[in-house]
Image (tube, rainbow, N blue to C red):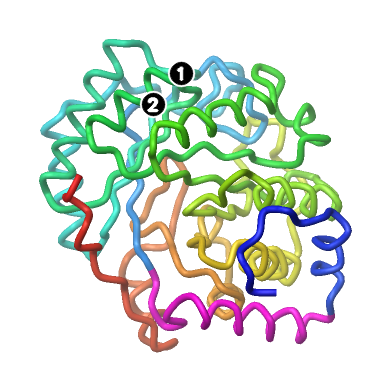
Amino acid sequence: MGVVRTDWRLDEVRALFDLPFADLMFHAQRVHRANFDPNRVQVSTLLSIKTGACPEDCAYCSQSIRFETGLRSEPLMDLEEVLEKARTARANGATRFCMGAAYRSPKPKQLAQIIEMVKGVRELGMETCVTLGMLTTEQARELKDAGLDYYNHNLDTSESYYKQIITTRTYQDRLDTLQAVRDAGINVCCGGILGMGESELDRVQLLHTLATLPEHPESVPINQLVQVPGTPMYGAKKVDALEFVRAIAVARLLMPRSYVRLSAGRSEMSDETQALCFLAGANSIFYGDKLLTTQNPDENHDLALFGRLGIVREAAHATACSQ
């Protein structure tokens, strides 16, 4: 454990999940310390730049046009409004600004507007990330030429459970977008969601897929489902806190040099659960009181927790604007 490899066998991943909790945490912390400062966390801010009216049927999502969630649709934001949000995020300590738009895939006019946002945020000295749904190879190249640092496109769950969550695009569609992003030279941000009724085997398979991509994602967000009334996933059995921590630890062992992001669902986690996640190897969070359309702990709470744990925020990378 601790060696970067992309040839993990499924039984090896399952064996990691089956380790006694103390042993798993020991190994995860050992590997984490070999690759990162254990008391430093990268902070990102996520902004919904176009909200709602998405044609997809992702069973967990408040933004699908197929579900009655009470969410008000909003068009693509103006450039200056986005840049003002980015300036605020930078002032609050975020080093990466992530922009999410509820698209199946962006149209040329939309992509052109978003490219200007990417350029503007980079000029502020921040890393840039977008999530826009599926991309073609050419679209990925356009974003790369604009200077995009990261593209987020989650697998969400295992391939075998995927059709229980989404029917409007295939698992292979997601893998194809990841390959287009990788081929364009953009860093990959890819993870999944726990607590959607999946089995432990589904969690094993999800992490196995991530860890056996040709290259590990540079950033791996692990989300706990935020249940939204009106979506099919509302009322799903919640994932056990220690099982969530276990998944964080296994992700750290499988992908030693990736940033593992403690992502959506933190507002429903205790401080103690979050502390265990950091101990298990999580070293990135989304910062700010909202993640697209769901709640997130406010900055003051996060700063207080960081203070109690002796955690400091990672400084902006010197190369953020070098491309």
Q: Residue at x 57, y 80 (%)?
A: 279
Name above or below for residue 168 compared with residue 23. above
Name above or below for residue 254 compared with residue 144. below
Residue 305 image offset from top left, x and y in percent: 42, 79
Q: Which residue is mark 1?
A: 136
Determine the image quadrant of residue 238. bottom right
Q: Quadrant of the C terminus?
A: top left
Q: Residue at x 23, y 64 (%)?
A: 316
**Total numbered badges shown on the rendered structure:** 2
Q: Which residue is mark 2?
A: 140
Residue 14 image offset from top left, x and y in percent: 85, 61
**Image disc number at residue 290:** none
Q: Residue at x 76, y 41 (%)?
A: 158
Which amino acid lies under the numbered mark 2 shown in the image of this protein? Answer: Ala
Which amino acid lies under the numbered mark 1 shown in the image of this protein? Answer: Thr
Residue 137 image offset from top left, x and y in percent: 44, 20
Which element is circle 1 on? Answer: loop
Per the image, is 98 magenta? no
Residue 287 image offset from top left, x and y in percent: 36, 59
Alpha-carbon distance for marks 1 and 2? 6 Å
Q: Is residue 13 left or right of residue 306?
A: right
Alpha-carbon neighbours of circle 2 within 10 Å: few (<14), some, or many (≥20)? many
Q: Quadrant of the N terminus?
A: bottom right
Mark 1–mark 2 contact, CB under 8 Å? yes
Magenta range: 20-41
Name above or below for residue 248 compared with residue 81. below
> Which secondary structure is most common in the magenta stretch?
helix
Q: Nearer the viewer, residue 175 or 63?
A: 175
